[in-house]
Amino acid sequence: MKKAWFLAIVLVLSAAGICFAEGSNLLIDDFEISITGGPEGTVDFGAGNGSNVEVTESSDIKNSGNKSLKVIYDAVDGGYIYVARGTGLDAKNANWSINSSDIKWEDYNAISFYVYGTDSKEKIAFDIKDNGGEIWRFVTEDDFKGWKRVVCSFDKFMVRDDWQPEDADKNGQLDFPIKIFQFEPLPGSKGTLYFDTVELVKK
Ligand SMILES: [Ca+2]
Ligand SMILES: [Ca+2]
């Protein structure tokens, strides 16, 4: 009997621990939006040099809430694609669900998102723009089927050496607050991806 009680207590504590761990992450974007592009858009997206992208919302395939971000893409060599959310973008209504400057960034050591993969083995870049306008990159691979959580530790981001905005501080330091994140299927790939549940991961 004692053993049973002990096991029960351990189970309850473990469950509480799991809830606490998840609850301490900060959900910054859940894509519970009506997706539009252009200057008044809720997502800043585009493609060039022969690549194409179409961004819509999905309500059938989603990880949290009622919707996810659906990205249909054709990324050719020499082309580029971006699908961005955050502050200071050309699309005026692309802000996250929380204001970047209200976040205690020192409490977090990673940013994570969920991606619904098709095991295409294609590379997907996840970029962030720092407070100095510098763009940092984390690369993951579509090597699974269904939803997967990708955790991008801040110390694993590499400063982009192929391109930086002209006004970037280019100081090689990841300056907080982060202003923007963007998904970018890398050249040589074509398909459909879904993204959802962007969180900051508590230290
Ligand atoms: Ca969602
Ligand atoms: Ca910087």
Image (tube, rainbow, N blue to C red):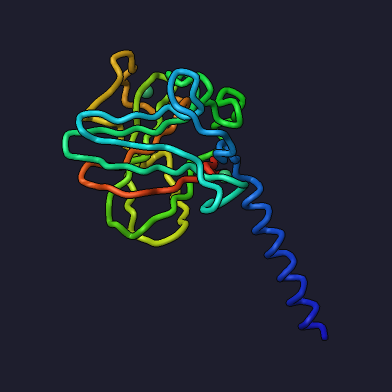
Measured along the vertical axis of the image, is residue 136 above or below residue 112? above
Name the side, left or right, on which 160 lies relative to 112: left
Please identify the residue farthest to the top as the structure is shown.
167
Q: Residue drawn at (54%, 51%), measured in percent from left and top?
A: 62
Measured along the vertical axis of the image, is residue 147 above or below residue 194? below
Q: Position of residue 8 (x, y in %)?
A: 76, 74
Please identify the residue farthest to the bottom as the structure is shown.
1
Quadrant in which the N terminus appears: bottom right
Say whether residue 66 is visible. yes
Please identify the residue farthest to the right as the structure is shown.
1
Say whether residue 110 is visible. no
Q: Nearer the viewer, residue 156 or 128?
A: 128
Name the side, left or right, on which 69 lies relative to 119: right
Q: Residue drawn at (46%, 39%), measured in percent from left and top?
A: 56
Name the side, left or right, on which 61 lies relative to 73: right
Quarter occupied by residue 139: top left
Q: Position of residue 121 (x, y in %)?
A: 28, 56
Image quarter where ligand 2 lies? top left
Q: Residue drawn at (31%, 26%), measured in percent from left and top?
A: 172
Please identify the residue farthest to the left as the structure is shown.
77
Measured along the vertical axis of the image, is residue 139 above or below residue 176? below
Q: Residue drawn at (35%, 32%), measured in percent from left and top?
A: 82
Quadrant in which the C terminus appears: top right
Q: Position of residue 61 (x, y in %)?
A: 51, 53
